[in-house]
Amino acid sequence: MERGENGGLKGPVQVTAIQGDVTQAHEVAAAVTGAHVVIHTAGLVDVFGRASPKTIYEVNVQGTQNVIEACVQAGTRLLVYTSSMEVVGPNTKGHPFYRGNEDTPYEAVHKHPYPCSKALAERLVLEANGKKVRGGLPLVTCALRPTGIYGEGHQIMRDFYRQGLRLGGRLFRAIPASVEHGRVYVGNVAWMHVLVARELEQRAALMGGQVYFCYDRSPYKSYEDFNMEFLGPCGLRLVGARPLLPYWLLVLLATLNALLQWLLRPLLVYAPLLNPYTLAVANTTFTVSTDKAQRHFGYEPLFSWEDSRTRTILWVQASEGSAR
Ligand SMILES: NC(=O)c1ccc[n+]([C@@H]2O[C@H](COP(=O)([O-])OP(=O)(O)OC[C@H]3O[C@@H](n4cnc5c(N)ncnc54)[C@H](O)[C@@H]3O)[C@@H](O)[C@H]2O)c1
Ligand SMILES: C[C@@H](CO)CCC[C@@H](C)[C@H]1CC[C@H]2[C@@H]3[C@H](O)C=C4C[C@@H](O)CC[C@]4(C)[C@H]3CC[C@]12C
């Protein structure tokens, strides 16, 4: 194997897939045994009410506890956790977080099961830093907090695309363009994980117990305007310079959806995109501006904004065939 541009090993890599459920401690233990570093990214991402709060807790919190325990038992010293921006916010009060960093004061108050579970899991991971693993050495942990991830495989982007096609090539603005929402390209999120995994051992004193926002040079825009960076070149247009529906009506629709979800629960899972929580997230400014990852472990985005945009557009276009 030779060294690549970024100093990493280049060439074929052997991957062994081990399938397992993080809620099953013995399955996690089997997967972790013999590992030098663990990147724990598994999670139940549900802000739509598809899964019960109990299931979200079991996967995201109990699952993370199982991963920590497996590291301790197996003597694995390095643990990287995929947390989320939602551990910080937007909070239930709708306070904006504008170009914030890891040290920006913010009242992180959550009620929804998903951010609550991510916050609890992140705390478990950070508190486990320094815990003795088998063999007596200390565990070194850190947490990465991506903002809204986009790129190939982004299901919600595909859903918006299909909806736009059904509506004759149009989407209708619901959120003011002035509300900025942080986004990061999936390849850069992955790259940041790889760098942390690579550097954590050497820089344990600096990086152990730390949190890092995942960021790149994607532009600051509203959720809908950002999506149009990809959906526009795929033939869709966003109608309206301002939201077409007044905010109070969106709140009413979101509340009706929540009520319907509750009423229909015994019969079926009704989980539309719009609910009071997703509306609040989409309608609250949350953007990150930081260089902590660069300072601590030399992170630079692997994919430029232009590359990230092109790759995402190509993926959306490729999904067109299956959309019709
Ligand atoms: N999508 C985002 O915008 C975003 C933003 C910030 C953080 N995150 C975090 O990134 C991680 C990956 O999210 P994603 O958006 O790729 O979601 P995803 O649903 O595509 O990936 C989650 C993965 O976890 C696996 N998983 C779920 N339950 C499991 C279980 N019980 N045992 C083992 N594996 C299980 C799924 O099979 C899936 O492969 C999650 O931890 C999520 O909280 C996502
Ligand atoms: C009101 C609609 C008009 O078009 C738009 C609704 C969009 C919402 C469904 C999404 C807006 C923001 C998204 C979330 C955000 O990007 C960050 C997240 C963090 C991550 O850990 C999980 C996914 C998510 C919660 C993401 C989910 C979808 C949105 C709420």
Image (tube, grey):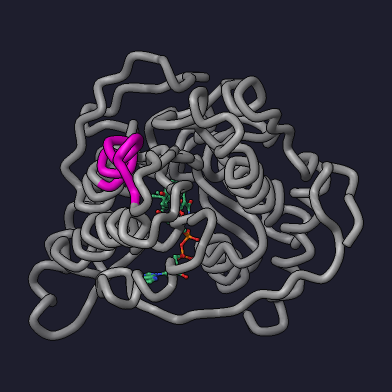
Asked whether the viewer can see residue 54, the reply is yes
Image: 256 above or below 220: below
| Residue 76 x/y as whole percent | 44, 54
Q: Is 8 drawn above or below residue 178 in the view shown? A: below
Q: Which contiguous range is marked in magenta?
A: 121-133
x 57%, y 73%: residue: 166
x then y, percent, for residue 162: 58, 71
Q: Residue furthest front?
A: 135
Residue in the picture at 41% in, 43% down: 84
Task: Count every numbered label the image shows and give the total.
Answer: 0
Up the image or down, 171 lies above or below 272; here it is above
Instruction: Please report the residue visible at 20 percent of the width from the left and 64 percent of the height from the top.
Output: 58
Quick check: 182 left or right of 165? Answer: left
Q: Depth check: 228 or 142 in front?
A: 142
- Answer with the quarter of the image where residue 295 lies: top right
Quarter holding the C terminus?
A: bottom right
Q: Residue at x 60, y 52 (%)?
A: 150
Residue 88 pos. (x, y %): 33, 31
